[in-house]
Image (cartoon, grey):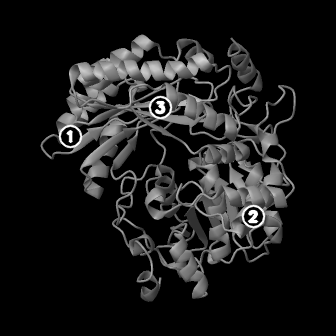
């Protein structure tokens, strides 16, 4: 990146590269080159563990037989902030990778991580700035293959026209098979390469694949894991070393896509985790080690593992953190026992305000459980509690909304009985039906209904000292449209981008009026995507086998109707 450009933008360190543990290979000695693209800023992308894992796998692929040096290379690229986008356009420069500063159109594969529906316009930004035709049908023999993966790939249809192929599920093993297929493809045409790639289990090639079965890693212990991850120049969202202790979740909340698509539950052995933790801390210099999973307290040896690590690194003043813990007295006491730096807050997600509605949505948490965990937190001198609820859940009534106010007030009163400085924050999000969950057929409430429910809770939350926050209704609306969308929506994404939509997941950049105009110009009514779906109607993602039979989802959905 030219120095004069860096002087014109905020946070130039986003575009420099050369961080600790970054991998630099000789471009001319490699034949398979991956650009790992994250459609958001550097500091958000560098917090993504999946990106670090794929970077490690590609760059550590052994050389094929008869070749002296490894032939695979992986480099990173992130969405430039609007100021850098403007500088690149003004200077007539292409979007480049961090490591070699090569334009991304020179790579063989550009792989996008699709973590959130509101990053879709950033994909267009990166392709346009990279000199790559936006639509797969427009690409020629010299253009890279555009690959997508991540949570949103479980319904890839709204952006399928922009991609040549997708990985459905976990990518560790599939990525190696993709590399081997490309190695053996020789000089065949682009379509012939895609035809070969479509034969890999877990790979979806739009226009070729008929059905796709999710891939998952059966055993985590031997699975490749980056023990020398890149340490960002600027503080990332998660600025810490992280060991993944397990995958999957046993609880089966009916609204949670990750809980259904990440099945089955798999654990790493304590022996492997202790070894990985040691290597990670030695190779990064971090002062915090995070034990991560969807629900860390469900790891069968969490007590022993956490205490062993805390004791081992106590003298080095390395903090052990346990995100994603169920807030109960065991978790609170364990977190306090192992923490060098005591957490000032706890987070709890009751999701619904009444026991009836928690039972409907499969949230296995009673009010007694909730109050027990919160009391344990206050007893440990924690003074801030964050509560997460959803509005618009199936079968929700006014009594359920009042229940949010009543539960928050009970927790506030309990906290103030321990400390006058106790603080409670209530966060409201709008329920969004997600593919491959028992609630995939449910309707999503409208923007007007969302605003009405937010207002109702604000009016009935009598304790003004309780802080109330909520997700922007229009952003939730848009996420819901794309969550269960079809191929028609690709033209809306492209049109919204042309009108100026960028960084839609950032509230300061989100411009809903541009999306309204894009829907209107494409003659598409977005409200149709929020309607209830009939149980027997075809769904855009039906061709994907996510590992859970549809009959199981239907049974769980029917049990919710109480």
Q: Position of residue 28 (x, y in %)?
A: 55, 81
Checking the image for residue 388, the label placed there is 3
First reached walking from the N terminus: tag 3 or tag 1: 1
Please rate how many residues cluster around mark 3, counting C-alpha atoms within 10 Å: few if below 14, some from 14 to 19, many from 20. Answer: some
Q: Residue at x 74, y 28 (%)?
A: 442
- Distance (Cα) linking label 3 and label 1: 24 Å
Q: Position of residue 203 (x, y in %)?
A: 72, 50
Q: Position of residue 123 (x, y in %)?
A: 65, 63
- Distance (Cα) linking label 3 and label 2: 33 Å
Please rate how many residues cluster around mark 2, counting C-alpha atoms within 10 Å: few if below 14, some from 14 to 19, many from 20. Answer: many
User: Callout 3: helix, strand or loop?
Assistant: strand
Checking the image for residue 341, the label placed there is 1
First reached walking from the N terminus: tag 3 or tag 2: 3
Please rate how many residues cluster around mark 1, counting C-alpha atoms within 10 Å: few if below 14, some from 14 to 19, many from 20. Answer: few
Residue 196 visible in image: no
User: Callout 2: helix, strand or loop?
Assistant: helix
Q: Nearer the viewer, residue 268 or 136?
A: 136
The residue singled out by tag 2 in the image is 494
Q: Nearer the viewer, mark 2 or mark 1?
A: 2
Give yes or no for contact between labels 3 and 2 (Cβ–Cβ under 8 Å).
Answer: no
Q: Residue at x 76, y 42 (%)?
A: 212
Place residue 408 in its image quadrant. top left
């Amino acid at each position: 990146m030219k120095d004069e450009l860096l002087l014109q933008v905020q946070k130039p360190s986003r575009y420099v590269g050369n961080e600790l543990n970054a991998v630099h290979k000789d471009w001319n000695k490699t034949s398979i080159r991956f650009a790992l693209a994250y459609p958001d800023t550097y500091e958000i992308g560098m917090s993504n563990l999946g990106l670090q894992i794929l970077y490690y796998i590609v760059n550590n692929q052994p050389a094929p037989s008869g070749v002296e040096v490894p032939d695979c290379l992986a480099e990173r690229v992130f969405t430039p902030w609007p100021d850098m986008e403007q500088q690149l356009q003004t200077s007539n420069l292409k979007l480049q990778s961090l490591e070699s500063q090569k334009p991304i159109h020179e790579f063989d594969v550009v792989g996008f991580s699709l973590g959130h529906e509101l990053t879709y316009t950033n994909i267009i930004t990166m392709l346009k700035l990279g000199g790559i035709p936006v639509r797969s049908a427009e690409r020629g023999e010299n253009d890279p293959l555009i690959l997508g993966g991540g949570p949103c790939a479980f319904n890839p249809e709204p952006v399928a026209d922009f991609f040549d192929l997708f990985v459905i599920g976990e990518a560790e093993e599939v990525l190696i098979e993709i590399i081997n297929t490309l190695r053996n493809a020789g000089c065949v045409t682009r379509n012939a390469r895609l035809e070969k790639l479509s034969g890999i289990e877990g790979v979806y090639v739009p226009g070729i694949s008929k059905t796709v079965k999710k891939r998952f890693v059966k055993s985590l212990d031997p699975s490749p894991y980056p023990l020398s991850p890149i340490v960002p120049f600027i503080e990332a969202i998660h600025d810490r070393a992280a060991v993944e202790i397990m995958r999957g979740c046993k609880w089966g909340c009916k609204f949670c896509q990750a809980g259904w698509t990440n099945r089955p539950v798999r654990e790493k052995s304590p022996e492997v985790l202790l070894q990985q933790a040691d290597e990670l801390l030695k190779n990064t210099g971090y002062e915090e080690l995070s034990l991560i999973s969807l629900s860390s307290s469900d790891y069968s040896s969490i007590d022993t593992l956490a205490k062993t690590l805390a004791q081992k690194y106590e003298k080095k003043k390395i903090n052990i953190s346990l995100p994603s813990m169920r807030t109960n007295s065991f978790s609170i006491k364990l977190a306090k026992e192992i923490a060098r730096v005591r957490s000032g807050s706890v987070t709890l997600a009751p999701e619904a305000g009444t026991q009836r509605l928690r039972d409907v949505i499969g949230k296995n948490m009673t009010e007694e459980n909730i109050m027990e965990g919160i009391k344990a937190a206050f007893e440990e001198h924690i003074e801030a509690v964050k509560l997460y609820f959803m509005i618009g859940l199936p079968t929700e009534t006014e009594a359920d909304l009042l229940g949010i106010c009543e539960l928050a007030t009970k927790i506030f009163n309990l906290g103030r009985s321990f400390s006058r400085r106790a603080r409670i924050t209530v966060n409201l999000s709008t329920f969004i039906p997600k593919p491959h969950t028992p609630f995939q057929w449910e309707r999503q409430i409208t923007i007007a209904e969302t605003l009405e429910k937010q207002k109702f809770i604000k009016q009935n939350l009598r304790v003004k000292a309780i802080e109330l926050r909520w997700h922007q209704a229009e952003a939730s609306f848009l996420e819901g449209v794309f969550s269960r969308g079809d191929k028609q929506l690709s033209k809306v994404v492209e049109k919204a981008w042309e009108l100026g939509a960028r960084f839609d997941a950032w509230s300061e950049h989100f411009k809903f009026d541009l999306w309204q105009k894009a829907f209107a110009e494409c003659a598409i009514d977005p409200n149709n995507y929020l309607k209830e779906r009939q149980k027997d109607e075809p769904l855009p993602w039906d061709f994907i086998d996510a590992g859970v039979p549809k009959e199981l989802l239907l049974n769980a959905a029917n049990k919710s109707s109480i």
